[in-house]
């Protein structure tokens, strides 16, 4: 049987103080990439990654480049990694995946991540929304309740079966949470985030990031990238770019992405980046699909 390997890359929330330090200390290539990142960003992100407080690391303009940098250094500087057969990333992680499959070069992707982070931060300040995790309801029920709630609230992350994050205006999110509990959700947990990611409230950031994406060269990847917006394998640079343009205001279809990777023969999943959040989600999705996989 042909065993296929998928590389997956985490999004915001996986950061921790000390992240990437071992790579910096032990790999010359990683050190060069991190120092280049310090130059491009205009501040020493490595200082914050290695010894910043949790508070420092939580600022969106730090978090996003930090996680991207850690992920990409792991993907490009580990000698013993076989080439992947497919890649995908959760939200911000899609930018790490683009570098890992050669669709976008490291420096261009870092510049995009910096724009994405600063524009999202501005959106959060101008239009603070909220997000909440809904546990124990089918996707269709979550969609139906969001659609029936007044104000803006949409499913933003399909993380795994029975775990969907909703996003939108604070009051609409709160109202939807109450309705989800009435409908039988095990839990409806407000998340401590600074804004309504992957919702229409991010439109201004999407427009600004879009200008930067338009100017960025996207090449044919070395393997298919499963993108958040479609959850399908993409290899055409124009389509990759188009999906990327829509990502900030569209849901992250992670459950569907992993299901499609499994259907396309993925048996080995490697999470590259800080933390292991995706490993837990993949285990649940694989077990719902009745698939045997190796996860690391």
Image (tube, grey):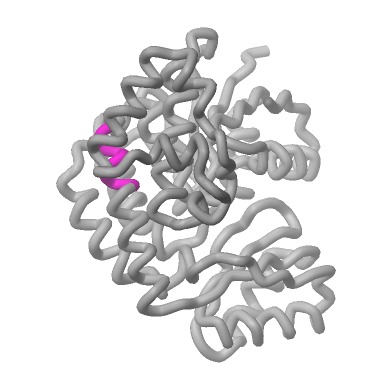
In magenta stretch: residue 108: yes
**The N terminus appears in which quarter of the rendering?**
top right
Is the residue 167 above or below the residue 152 in the image?
A: above
Q: Please provide percent x and percent y for residue 67.
A: 48, 40
Q: Tell which residue pokes out farthest to the left in this image.
A: 215
Front residue of this view, candidates 277 and 150 = 277
Compared across the picture, whether 136 is left or right of 277 comes to right
Q: Which residues are magenta?
A: 107-113
Q: Nearer the viewer, residue 205 or 228?
A: 205
Horizontal side, residue 108 vs residue 129: left or right? left
The image quadrant that residue 123 belongs to is bottom left
In the image, is 210 to the left or to the right of 62?
left
- Percent across and percent down for residue 82 are 52, 12
Q: Please tell me which residue lies in front, 267 or 129.
A: 129
**Residue furthest out toward the bottom:** 150
Task: Tell me the residue at 32%/58% (across/down).
Answer: 118
* Residue 111 lies in the magenta stretch: yes
Question: Outermost residue, top direction?
Answer: 80
Which residue is pictured at 54% across the width and 8% down the height?
A: 80
Depicted 112 relative to depicted 223: above or below: below
Q: Is residue 154 visible?
A: no
Asked whether 74 or 2 is in front, the reply is: 74
Q: Residue 28 location in percent, x, y?
A: 38, 13
The total of numbered circles placed on residues is 0
* Image quadrant containing the C terminus: top right
Please name the residue shown 54% across and 28% down the image.
Answer: 7
| Residue 57 visible within the image | yes
From this view, report whether residue 90 is shown above or below residue 4. below
Dominant secondary-structure state across the stretch colored magenta: helix
Q: Is residue 29 above or below residue 105?
A: above
In which quarter of the view is residue 72 placed?
top left
Picture coordinates of residue 45, whole percent (x, y): 38, 40
């Amino acid at each position: 049987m042909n065993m296929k390997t998928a590389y997956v890359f985490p999004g915001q929330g996986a950061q921790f103080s000390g992240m990437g330090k071992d790579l910096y200390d032990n790999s010359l290539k990683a050190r060069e990439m991190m120092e280049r990142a310090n130059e491009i960003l205009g501040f020493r992100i490595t200082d914050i990654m290695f010894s910043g407080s949790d508070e420092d690391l939580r600022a969106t303009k730090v978090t996003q480049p930090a996680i991207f940098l850690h992920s990409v250094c792991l993907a490009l500087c580990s000698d013993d990694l076989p080439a992947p057969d497919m890649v995908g990333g959760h939200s911000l992680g899609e930018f790490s995946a683009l570098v890992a499959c050669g669709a976008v070069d490291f420096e261009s992707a870092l510049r995009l991540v910096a724009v994405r982070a600063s524009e999202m931060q501005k959106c959060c300040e101008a239009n603070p929304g909220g997000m909440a995790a809904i546990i124990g309801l089918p996707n269709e029920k979550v969609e139906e309740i969001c659609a029936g709630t007044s104000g803006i609230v949409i499913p933003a992350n399909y993380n795994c079966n029975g775990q969907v994050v909703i996003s939108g205006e604070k009051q609409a999110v709160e109202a939807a949470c109450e309705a989800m509990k009435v409908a039988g959700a095990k839990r409806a947990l407000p998340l401590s985030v600074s804004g309504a990611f992957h919702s229409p409230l991010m439109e201004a950031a999407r427009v600004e990031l879009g200008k930067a994406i338009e100017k960025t060269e996207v090449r044919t990847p070395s393997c298919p990238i499963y993108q958040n917006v479609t959850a399908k394998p993409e290899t055409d640079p124009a389509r990759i770019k188009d999906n990327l343009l829509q990502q900030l205001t569209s849901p992250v279809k992670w459950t569907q992405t992993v299901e499609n990777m499994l259907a396309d023969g993925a048996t080995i999943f490697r999470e590259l980046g800080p933390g292991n959040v995706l490993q837990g989600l993949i285990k649940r999705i694989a077990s719902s699909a009745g698939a045997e996989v190796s996860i690391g």
